[in-house]
Amino acid sequence: MISEAPKPSDQLLSTVAQLKPPFYLIDEAALVTNLEILRDVANRSGAKIVLAQKAFAQPQLYPLIGRYLDGACASGHWEAELARTHLPEEAEVITCSPAYNDEDISALLPISDHLDFNSLSQWSRYREQCLSYRVEHHSSIHFGLRINPEFSTGETPLYDPCASGSRLGITVEQLRGCELLDGISGLHFHTLCEQGLDDLADTIQAVEEKFGWLLSQEQICYLNLGGGHWITKDGYDREGLVRLIQELTTKYQLQVYLEPGEAVAIHSGILVGTVLDLHRNGDVTNAILDLSATAHMPDVLEMPYRPDVYLDGTLALESGEHLYRLTGNTCLAGDQIGDYAFHRSLQVGDQIVFNDMAHYTMVKTTFFNGVKHPAIHLHHTDGSLSTLREYSYQDYLALKK
Ligand SMILES: Cc1ncc(COP(=O)(O)O)c(C=O)c1O
């Protein structure tokens, strides 16, 4: 950890009482502060910096984001569509998915600037279609490969694409002797999560040791360093990052891309819920909220992650006199957000503010990574089928009219 989350601004907290919980509240000023830092790093380093939509995908803010960033990265069709239709026309759409199907490829070719492949089997399956598309449509689309440097620097296995047996990226063993590299013009790796410059520098060294032979080839014109860079966090060595990018650019004569998600929206929004009931059992007082860890804040269970919580603008502590277990209103026994000690006893109707919820948590409440929900069909007793529910891109977009 480089530093803890700063308190949400007093201006933001003063508006909370005007809205009906539960809700997320995005702080535009905080978002702009992050965007200004990222633009400055891009300008000084020469890197292109794009938004990772898996962390923040609120299209009404894309015109603002597009004024600062060079585009967005997408993990599939719906995210690519969102970026292409809501960012400014000149914005780049950088697509890389763990796996595509035929429909994805046909939809993505016209709207992506980079289409990166996560395995040689996927590249081999779609290579001819991709290369023919480029010629037939006079397209400037580039095709790249996601590599796996097999170099772990993070602490949470759930967020480690280099963990043993990982499905993310192509290892050097798989790539050596590969006869399909014609048509590939970029390399992409993503291995970091909430990390500083030292981990990036060590990872680049590992990438150079394993993939330097490919990086130096003339056909490679971009290197995408993925996300996980905590660039907008206080204490991040931004000067060092600028130097490192400049060195890479000069050494390999290529365009460097960064695709941060969290760094775009960190410290720029809160989630507010209400206490519905206080339920005492033995030593524990459960405060049941109109929110849920499993439905709205899955990182609290998965990571696991403990968000900062405020009551009346005062930070709750880990222990103290007024200790409560904040819990969700689903039937899952483990729908628990955590134990928090407040400066006073809680009352039904109190508003609880969760800090730093605009990145990841907000998209996980909706359609994480733009991944389609499965349809729901019914097999009737007479053998016929009917469709009960089906989700479309419009459901993912779901803009308020
Ligand atoms: C391929 C890729 N790029 C970018 C990101 C964004 O990472 P972060 O939000 O940590 O910057 C992720 C996150 O999982 C990712 O998988």
Image: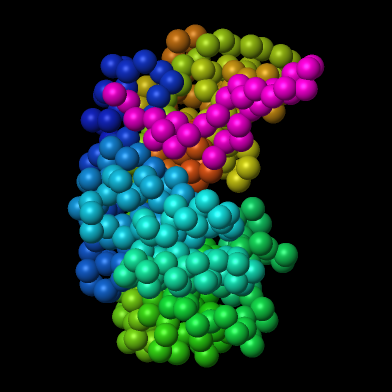
Q: Check the image and report above or below for 170 versus 26.
A: below
Residue 29 visible to an observer of this rendering: yes
Residue 262 magenta? no
Using the image as rendered, state which of residue 69 and residue 399 is in the foreground. 399
Q: Position of residue 71 (x, y in %)?
A: 31, 57
Residue 391 magenta? yes
381 relative position to 84: left or right: right
Residue at the image position 20 percent from the left and 53 percent from the top: 67
Quarter of the rendering containing residue 224: bottom left
Residue at the image position 36 percent from the left and 15 percent from the top: 20
Q: Check the picture and name the quadrant holding the C terminus.
A: top left
Span highlighted in magenta in the image:
372-401
Q: Position of residue 93 (x, y in %)?
A: 36, 58
330 relative position to 229: left or right: right
Indicate how the structure is coloured in the image. Answer: rainbow
Q: Position of residue 377 (x, y in %)?
A: 66, 26
Residue 189 visible to an observer of this rendering: no
Q: Position of residue 311 (x, y in %)?
A: 42, 24
Using the image as rendered, state which of residue 67 and residue 340 is in the foreground. 67
115 relative position to 390: left or right: left
Number of numbered discs visible in the structure rendering? 0
Residue at the image position 64 percent from the left and 27 percent from the top: 376
Using the image as rendered, state which of residue 221 and residue 299 is in the foreground. 221
Q: Check the image and report above or below for 221 versus 394.
A: below
Residue at the image position 60 percent from the left and 46 percent from the top: 303
400 relative position to 219: left or right: left
Q: Check the image and report above or below for 321 versus 266.
A: above
